[in-house]
Image: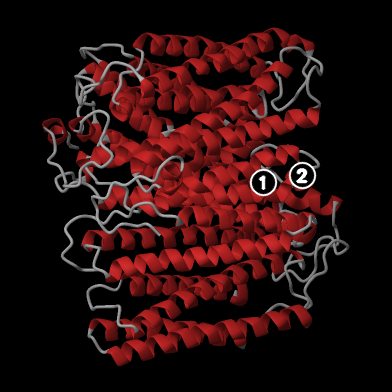
Amino acid sequence: MTESVHAHADEKPPGLWRWVVTTNHKDIGTLYLLFALLMFFIGGSMSMVIRTELFQPGLQFTDPLFFNQMTTMHALVMIFGAVMPAFVGLANWQIPLMIGAPDMAFPRMNNWSFWILPFAFSMLLSTLFMPGGAPAGGWTMYPPLVLMTGDAFPYLIFSIHLMGLSSLMGAINIIVTILNMRTPEMNLMKMPLFVWTWLVTAFLLIAAMPVLAGVVTMLLTDRYFGSSFFNAAGGGDPVMFQHIFWFFGHPEVYIMILPAFGVVSTIIPTFARKPLFGYASMVYATASIAFLSFIVWAHHMFTVGMPLAAELFFMYSTMLIAVPTGVKIFNWVSTMWRGSMTFETPMLWAISFVVLFTIGGFSGLMLAITPADFQYQDTYFVVAHFHYVLVTGSVFGIFGAVYYWLPKWTGNMYNERLGKIHFWCSIVFSNLLYFPQHFLGLAGMPRRVPDYAIQFTDWNQVSSIGGIGFGLTQLIFVYIVFQAIRSGSKAPARVWDGAIGLEWSVPSPAPYHTFQEPPKLTEGELQREGI
Amino acid sequence: MSSATERYYLPHNSYWPILGSIGLCALFVGFARLLTGANIGSTLMIFGGLIMVLMLVGWFGTVIRESQSGSYNQQVGRSYRWGMCWFIFSEVMFFGAFFAALFYARVLSVPWLGGEDSGISTHLYLWPDFIAAWPLLQLPDPSQFSAAKAPMEAAGIPALNTLILLSSAATVTWAHWGLKAERRRQLIVGLILTVSLGLLFLTLQAYEYRHAFTELNLGIGSGIYGTTFIMLTGFHGLHVTVGAIMLMVVLGRSLAGHFTPLGHFAFEASAWYWHFVDVVWLLLFTFVYWL
């Protein structure tokens, strides 16, 4: 095996092998981001099928089984294939640069974390061509429905095991990197907030992913080995699955949003040219959200039948999350207050994140109220809610991060004009896509149906037009990214004049190896402190 | 490990991860094919398993060589220690899922099926003859699963196994003292004792399983009692096996003189892991066998 003992060795195998055997955090970060982009389009094309079918009532293009396969696979691909790998890719590129580390703590394991993913998703996507089709019981895999999946069933379970393994190794790598690889002057309360949010996210991943692995293992043994975890005939309970699943599932939604909080907390101070307002309170809010995420899981299952005390407990604990989240929103707004603001593309994404994520947060509060949830559950209102937090929240956060750091990664400025076009089209179309779904849900349209009553037609058509537009808009993004990789005006080391942080002290593009010696903190970094 | 290397060691270009991915994929696809009744399932599984073994031996071998050649400084050692701690934490959460299933069944689902609290209408409508009890020897629907004839007693082999695992925790600590005080004999003897106790535990566990299957009709298919019993003790047994293999490697490396009083991460990691399976066993003994 060609593992050189010299830390300086910089030999890259020719061609594609370089990407297969690399242990470099920048290479692996790039791989993660490109993989996430690919999955974003695969999952996105599935949602195009959904929105096309829903353009009119009645069945036009798909049969109901295939429609259900699309909703199930769309969610699995977007969650595990697009959003999570994109954030891990950002972590890989940025965390070593932001804390002054020469690389991740475990470079080889880093490679493995990534290279499990293409295999896992090949397995998952291959189920589309299997007898009985892909899994169609929803991404939440509730038994007994999911146990009726065809030959795809074990592939679904094992692909989730593989994704879990990948996330787990990625999370251990990130948490150890943050705890052990910081440049000496950088104590925890001087870390950039993106690093803080990833520290907490990695903890959530390590705590939650094994629970998912456990619960899907129970599904496997229930189906093939005669266990009765989720079968009341043997003393088990299908609802037990939902409890264990959502014990993973709720931290999972914070896994997908906390790094976006970190991104926004990085971008806004840069373009407001003010230090982040309330750094310490941001840190404590992040930690509080992480803690609360473990005691709110049953708000996903208010209507399943639970003791009244449980309904009340999970209602109040859920509403409590609005407090630390509110702290964050107010801190971002206060950071912008009287700042010398400019509105480059990353800032536009960050501001739209604050506004639109807040809409998703408010609809979340509505859903948290148990008696109200009895009405909203399983309607398009829920779909609208989680797409506001996941698309205009997480995905917009990722877009912001990519525009913010792309010049650092490629050494070239992206096309600002096209970036703004991408942003404005995304804003218009995503709101056209998701906002009417609130109305549909409140009017009673159920989710996961290929057909609907005729009175829902108008808003569904608006939503579908928004969906197709949002999908096509993303082609602009691909063009912008590849244009920035190949050409564009050269970016200086400090790409944004209000930016602080160690990543701006290295040239653009960042050299293959950075911070072989621990760096001194910049003035801005030293001023950052938690009081 | 505690060499004078100043820089954090960064490996370059490793083929082990991609080999591991291919092995894992073959293993899982093979298993899936076996479960769905497709051909070459078991062949693919064996192939994948062999690749995994090759990968693990090769990867750990590389790490051991790098460690012995003094490439790692103390910061690398700290990374490994943190990494192992978080890995064990993830294992705790994995077992947590199965303990959650056990407690959910014992505290909620079985009493509800017996008509307690809000379960009364379900009880009367579905299985009015079912009487809730733990261990579950009568099942809600006996036509679907066949119940165990008798529970697994805590006294006897399980109690003996508790003693064995607790003793092995003592012997591994004793070996650690030997390592730190550079008493090589104590280190070797302590590790041999620990591994032997681990293997004895596994042998007794296998014997107990045979007893459960043949005489008690207690297996994964005998209702939620058998399901949680087999899954919890089964995964625990698997972890004891992994821990024993780790300790055997550590024993081999101790014989080869790899460890110094200050640098012996592999020993520490294996010992932590061993204590972890020990603690899991204590919980198992208490809640699966005893109470």
Identify the coloring: secondary structure
Tell me, yes or no, whether the two marked residues, 1 and 2, touch with CB atoms within 8 Å. Answer: yes
Quadrant including the C terminus of chain B: bottom right
Label disc, if present, on residue A66 of the rendered structure: none
Q: CA distance from mark 1 to mark 2?
A: 9 Å
Residue under label 2, please give it.
Answer: A149
Mark 1: give few (<14), some (14-19) or many (20+) Cα within 10 Å: many
Label disc, if present, on residue A156 of the rendered structure: 1
Q: Nearer the viewer, residue A375 or B52?
A: B52
In the image: residue A437, left or right of residue B197: right
Image coordinates for residue A76, horizontal then vertical, percent? 60, 37
Q: Amino acid at mark 1?
A: Leu
Q: Indicate the quadrant where residue B151 lies.
A: bottom right
Reply above or below: A350 against A25. above
In the image: residue A429, left or right of residue B73: right
Q: Residue at x 70, y 19 (%)?
A: A444
Reply above or below: A284 against A54. below
Name the subunit of mark 2: A
Reply above or below: A155 against A506. below
Reply above or below: A353 against A232. above
Image coordinates for residue A227, horizontal then vertical, percent? 73, 61
In the image: residue B231, left or right of residue A333: right
Q: Residue at x 39, y 58 (%)?
A: B86
SS at badge 1: helix
Q: Amino acid at mark 2?
A: Thr
Q: Indicate the quadrant where residue B49 lies.
A: bottom right
Q: Residue furthest toward the front? A: A14
SS at badge 2: loop
